[in-house]
Amino acid sequence: MEADSKSDVASWSIQVTLPSGYSASVIAFSTSSVAELKAAAKDALGIRFLQFMHGDGRVFDVGGRATLQDAGLYDGVTLTAIAQEPKIAASSGAFALWCHGQSVVTWGDPETGGDSSSVQDLLKSGRVQQVVASANAMAAILMDGRVVTWGAPKLGGDSSSVQDQLKDVQQVVGTAEAFAAILANGHVVTWGRPDWGGDSSSVQDQLKDVQQIAASESAFAALLTNGHVVTWGLSLSGGDSSSVQAQLEGVRRVIGAEIAFAAILHNGDVVSWGAPEQGGDSSSVQDQLKDVQQVVPFSAAFAAILADGSVVTWGDPNRGGDDGAELTKVKQIETSYDAFAAVLQDGSVFTWGVPIWGGDSSKVRDQLRDVQEIKASQGAFAAMLPGGRVVTWGDEDQGGDCSSVQHQLTDVQLIQASARAFAAIVADGRVVTWGAPAFGGDSSNIQEQIQEM
């Protein structure tokens, strides 16, 4: 940091200490900004995202542009630094980057959450603990349990009508055009497009002791602590579960696809409902659905991973409902709109579905070794390999081609996808994006904000 050119300003020595005891002395000036101090501390400690704390454990909650003197610091003071784990949420066309207890940086399509400027003051003062995205909006749960929303107002971006009810929020889940929040007392608050799950008044008296909520495109399913399930929203999309209600007992987990739901029971069986031909009817494979460990939603089908790693699929046969069933030793399945990728336990990858959207990975097959995780946009896949390397395939316009940023994709820690773009957090704190610029594939205008986190 350089001293103010107008006068000779004495340098300060500020000690920055991690909870582990490791510390570094940072040289600063009274006229330096808190943001400059944080940048110097990051370099000295080798940490890319951090938060300052007072000695008594309180968050050092001062604007980054404030000078050290204005912030009440002095020569010889000791600050505690907490390493932060960055996370990314993605709507259909935008991304949000945040660290626990800090504010949020957004980019991409403003209409789907890429512009959070109208709520930044609330996000900064409230300290964010989690951000959740629907297709058209975003919702941040603050440290005090309140919720801040932005994006398309009528599709979940405006929660003002229920703001007085959004207290002690524990979880938020979104359909494409509405949100549902679970409160600490197990009750549920909804907002957004009424017929797509934003109005839960018809089942409000049943929404007690809720422990999990799943969403399809336009309906919600709430799992109660007693193992029962309550649904609302568009009937065709799973908002009406009356046909299987007697079977929905002892439910362990509920999963939503585009217009259907599947519930895993405690005994390992599966019950499904919603659009029959698109995953809502699993009767043709019911005898195979035993010892189910995980159910993966496709756009119009489901895949169940059994205890032995084998896979059972059902739903639209042209959209994943009858492919991949011969797979064994599966660790993860990821889906684009109509293509599918399975990571096997040996780290290899098997793909199927529409070739141009990622169903054909033959061009990169030799590179797909020891794959750790896969993420999917609407028409492409990105695989994370050892060393934080990334391999992509599928529609180039939807993130299937990362060649323009390949040299930056080393030591990648996290990947997230919007409908047509990808965002990766690199170990040195940079965010690397590619794919359709309008969908978050261009993050050049927010890089400075990211470096200040």
Image: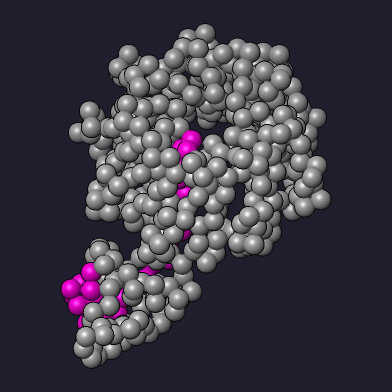
Q: Is residue 148 visible?
A: yes
Residue 166 drawn above or below residue 447: above
The location of residue 47, given as percent across then percent down, is: 46, 70
Q: Residue at x 54, y 15 (%)?
A: 274
The location of residue 376, given as percent across then percent down, is: 61, 40
Q: Residue furthest front?
A: 6
Q: Quadrant location of residue 400? A: top right
Q: Is 83 inside the magenta-drawn segment?
A: yes
Residue 270 drawn above or below residue 379: above
The location of residue 373, given as percent across then percent down, is: 64, 48
Q: Is residue 263 visible?
A: no
Q: Which residues are magenta?
A: 66-95
Q: Residue at x 64, y 51 (%)?
A: 402
- What kind of colouring is applied to the model shown? one colour
Residue 98 drawn above or below residue 218: below
Q: Residue at x 42, y 47 (%)?
A: 107
Report whether 276 appears left or right of 67. Answer: right
Residue 244 drawn above or below residue 416: above
Q: If the image is split into quadrants, where does the C terminus sit?
A: bottom left
Q: Is 73 inside the magenta-drawn segment?
A: yes
